Image: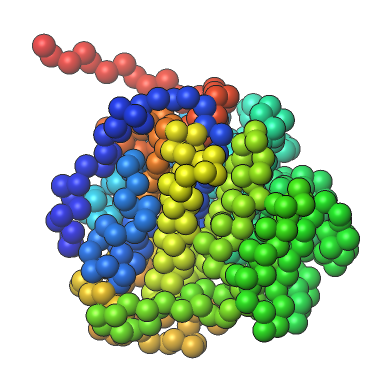
């Protein structure tokens, strides 16, 4: 059912103004990733906050599109079912990875073919990327298999252009060629798949201690802020970084370190540490998080007419605080910077079909993007829309969320299982009044929304639809080409599409 007639007439791409048509190299690249985020989640959160569908900070950016997210694992599932050849980076059939004729040209509710349910929710289980392979695609330009962190697989026939092993990342390219500073920020552990793929390598995403040791001990990004705190209020067992790594970074004179402390406001301590790092020419490591490793999601309250969000605890910062802290340090670098900022528990909320938590986490992303918009708009800090590219994407969708009947501002659906459902218990919430529905507790192959602003945003228009003729879809590997071109280091894609049968010339 389509309930957003107004959105359907909204252009999928807003024409860039002449001022935006320049492609002068940008020096500030900011990539926001809403993990597991789908268009339905943006609409739901905008309605809760503003009573209409288009009020989030990033929804108002001048460029919008949609992105396909499949990985090699997904491709090979579909290829096997179709009797087609497995993934070969020199002969890719993009429609095997994402068949828009079955799933739609754009995310629900912009498109809603009758075949979508069967395509996205196949009877034999999920056909979708995970965060590791999705992040790898965006930051290296290569497809890989589920669970791999900037790491190429051994592909059938040995036809991979790089073979098995580490894939060079955008961070490595920009640091080596342009002297860019690198920052990763996440509301989930900093060694989790999405941030890890930018600044470490490995075949297994769940080898957190090894990835954390690489990130802090070898790559040494100028900014690392995330969850994974192992102290009394956090995970007790050093799950996300080894004690040895933790001790070493605490003693590292290059890093200003700030951590969660009982009774201390994490926003205040993090911003103070960022200022100290900026003043002292140091890097910044901010380690926060709660029992599950994440920042503990902001909470949306059911107060029809008066939307209200509150922090789960003051001991963790919000994403916007972490982003502001990162900008204070990264803007000290005269050459420029790359910042990857992830709202990682949108995905966790959707795995649990937890609508209330979903609203809190998408609000967290909305606020953080607004913080960047304000920072760029503010004069005097060297960041302008002419030298900055802001991208807001998702790595994949999670939960197959559908908004069945509209909810007004401040209004949440009746949600059963609160306290029992949610990430902590790994049970699914249910909605007895049926205002919302979920079709999955895992990832889906649905296309995801993409928003952009800045001088180089029109570069996105150049690739839209090229892998998926008949649509405006961008492939997640093409995001890498766009970012590299935006900073003046264009990289040809190492991937080749299978030659298409020539189409008949159009009739005059
Ligand atoms: Zn997930």
Q: Nearer the viewer, residue 229 or 122?
A: 229
Task: Quadrant for the C terminus, please.
Answer: top left
Quarter where residue 334 is shown? top right
Side of 23 where 186 appears, left or right: right
**Residue 339 in picture, x, y percent from top left:** 59, 46
**Residue 15 in picture, x, y percent from top left:** 26, 34
Look at 66% across and 29% down and name the residue there: 178
Q: Nearer the viewer, residue 10 or 330?
A: 330
Image vertical order of residue 384 relative to residue 253, above or below: above
Side of 255 where 460 appears, left or right: left
Side of 116 where 345 appears, left or right: right
Look at 67% across and 70% down and name the residue there: 269
Image vertical order of residue 319 relative to residue 330, above or below: below
**Residue 263 in picture, x, y percent from top left:** 67, 84
Look at 60% across and 70% down and name the residue there: 267
Quarter where residue 469 is shown? top left
Task: Quadrant for the N terminus, please.
Answer: bottom left
- Count of marks, rendered view: 0
How was this image coloured? Answer: rainbow
Image vertical order of residue 258 relative to residue 281, above or below: below
Q: Residue 260, can we see it?
A: yes
Q: Residue 157, can we see it?
A: no
Look at 67% across and 79% down and name the residue there: 264
Q: Residue furthest front?
A: 380
């Amino acid at each position: 059912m389509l309930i957003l007639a107004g959105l359907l007439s909204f252009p999928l791409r807003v024409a860039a103004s002449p001022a935006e048509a320049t492609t002068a190299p940008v020096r500030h690249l900011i990539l926001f990733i809403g993990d597991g985020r789908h268009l339905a989640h943006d609409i739901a959160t905008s309605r809760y906050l503003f009573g209409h569908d288009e009020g989030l900070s990033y929804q108002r950016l001048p460029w919008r599109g949609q992105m396909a997210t499949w990985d090699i694992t997904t491709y090979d599932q579909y290829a096997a079912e179709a009797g087609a050849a497995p993934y070969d980076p020199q002969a890719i059939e993009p429609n095997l990875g994402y068949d828009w004729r079955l799933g739609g040209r754009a995310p629900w509710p912009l498109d809603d073919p009758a075949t979508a349910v069967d395509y996205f929710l196949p009877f034999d289980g999920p056909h979708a990327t995970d965060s590791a392979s999705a992040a790898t695609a965006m930051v290296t330009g290569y497809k890989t298999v589920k669970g791999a962190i900037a790491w190429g697989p051994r592909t059938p026939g040995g036809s991979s252009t790089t073979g098995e092993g580490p894939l060079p990342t955008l961070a490595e390219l920009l640091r080596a060629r342009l002297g860019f500073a690198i920052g990763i920020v996440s509301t989930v552990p900093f060694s989790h798949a999405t941030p890890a793929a930018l600044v470490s390598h490995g075949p297994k995403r769940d080898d957190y201690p090894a990835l954390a040791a690489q990130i802090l001990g070898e790559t040494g990004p100028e900014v690392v802020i995330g969850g994974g705190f192992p102290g009394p209020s956090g995970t007790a067992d050093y799950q996300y970084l080894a004690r040895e790594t933790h001790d070493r970074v605490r003693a590292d004179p290059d890093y200003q370190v700030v951590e969660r402390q009982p009774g201390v406001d994490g926003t205040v301590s993090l911003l103070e540490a960022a200022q100290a790092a900026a003043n002292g020419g140091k890097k910044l490591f901010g380690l926060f998080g709660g029992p599950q490793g994440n920042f503990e999601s902001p909470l949306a309250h059911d107060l029809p007419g008066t939307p209200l969000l509150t922090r789960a605890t003051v001991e963790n910062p919000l994403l916007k605080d972490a982003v502001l802290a990162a900008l204070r340090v990264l803007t000290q670098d005269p050459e420029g910077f790359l910042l990857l900022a992830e709202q990682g528990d949108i995905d966790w909320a959707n795995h649990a079909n937890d609508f209330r938590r979903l609203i809190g986490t998408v609000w967290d992303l909305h606020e953080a993007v607004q913080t960047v918009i304000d920072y760029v708009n503010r004069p005097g800090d060297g960041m302008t829309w002419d030298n900055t590219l802001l991208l807001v994407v998702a790595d994949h969708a999670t939960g197959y969320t559908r908004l069945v009947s509209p909810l007004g501002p401040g209004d949440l659906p009746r949600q059963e299982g609160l306290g029992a459902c949610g990430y902590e218990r790994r049970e699914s919430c249910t909605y007895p009044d049926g205002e919302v529905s979920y079709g999955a507790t895992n990832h889906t192959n649905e296309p995801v929304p993409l928003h952009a602003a800045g001088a180089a945003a029109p570069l996105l228009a150049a690739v839209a639809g090229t892998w998926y003729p008949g649509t405006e879809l961008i492939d997640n590997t093409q995001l890498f080409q766009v970012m590299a071109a935006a900073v003046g280091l264009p990289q040809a894609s190492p991937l080749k599409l299978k030659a298409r049968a020539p189409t008949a010339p159009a009739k005059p």
